[in-house]
Image (cartoon, rainbow, N blue to C red):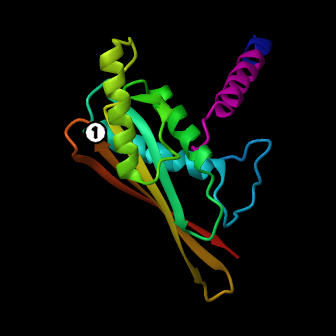
Amino acid sequence: MAWKHVLLCQTVSCACALLAGCVTPPDTHRPSAGEDSRVVISLTNHDYDLAAQALLTELLTRLPKGYVVGLGPVDTSDTPYNVQVKTIQKALMVAFNKDGTLKFSSRDATKSRGCDQAIQDFREYNRWVKEEGERISEVNGVLCGRVSSTEVSLKDGGRQVTYVFTWELHDTIKDELLVSHNYPLTKNVR
C-alpha cells in the first residue's frame, strides 16, 4: 500500500512539473537568427512589420472586404536614415496576405513621381482592365506613404529617434482621401 502512495505522489509531482513547463511566456519580440538583438537607431524588419500591422488594423476598420490596394510611392526624404521601401512593401504584402480580408495588388506605382501620378497610373490601369475585359481585379485605392524622423539627445548621453510612418489611401474612382494614418515608432540608444 505504501508503494501505491509513493507512486501517486510521483505521478502528481511529474504532472505538476509538466504543466508548469507548459505556461506560455508573454508575447515579446525575440530576434530571429539573422537579426541583431541590440537596439539600433536604424529600422529593422521587426519595425517594418509593426508599422505594416498598425496600418492594416486601421484599414480593416475602414474598408470593405475584398478592397484592392495598390502601393504608390513612399517618400523618405525627411529622414537622414536608410529606409528600405521594398522592405515596407513586402511587410505590407505579408500582413495583407495573412489576414485575407483586403487584397494587395501585385502591380505597384512605387516609382511614380508623387502620389498624384500614382493615382493617375492606377486609373489608366483600371481603364485598361475594363477595356480588355481582363479577369484581374481593378485597384480600388492607392496607398502612398512618407517616413520622417526626428532625433533628440538624451540627458544620459543617449539618442532618441522617432520615426513617423504616414500613410494616405486615395480612392482611384471617387478621387477621395479615404484613410490617413500615422504610426510613430521611437527608438532609444544609449
Give, as a single range, the part of the protein colored magenta: 6-28
Foreground pick, 37 / 135 = 135
- Can residue 28 be seen in the rendering of this structure? no
Q: Residue 37 appears in which quarter of the rendering?
A: bottom right
User: Which percent across, then down, holds residue 98?
Assistant: 50, 27
- Can residue 173 be seen in the rendering of this structure? yes
Task: Check disc 1 and report its element: helix, strand or loop.
Answer: helix
For residue 98, side relative to residue 14 (left or right): left
Q: Could you tell me which residue is drawn at 75 percent across and 61 percent down?
A: 38
User: Which percent across, then down, holds residue 93?
Assistant: 52, 34
Q: Could you tell me which residue is drawn at 70 percent across and 27 percent down?
A: 18
Residue receiving disc 1 = 61
Foreground pick, 33 / 1 = 33
Q: In which quadrant will I find the N terminus?
A: top right
Foreground pick, 137 / 183 = 137
Question: Does residue 95 lie above or below 8 as drawn?
Answer: below
For residue 33, side relative to residue 69 (left or right): right
Tell me if residue 22 is in the magenta stretch: yes
Q: Could you tell me which residue is drawn at 32 percent across and 35 percent down?
A: 123
Q: Could you tell me which residue is drawn at 36 percent across and 23 percent down?
A: 128
* Residue type, mark 1 in image: Thr
User: Which percent across, then down, holds residue 47?
Assistant: 58, 52
Q: Neighbour class for label 1 at 10 Å: few (<14), some, many (≥20)?
A: few
User: Which percent across, then down, holds residue 64?
Assistant: 26, 29
Question: Does residue 179 lie above or below 41 as drawn?
Answer: above
Question: Does residue 9 lie above or below 34 as drawn?
Answer: above
Q: In which quadrant will I find the C terminus?
A: bottom right
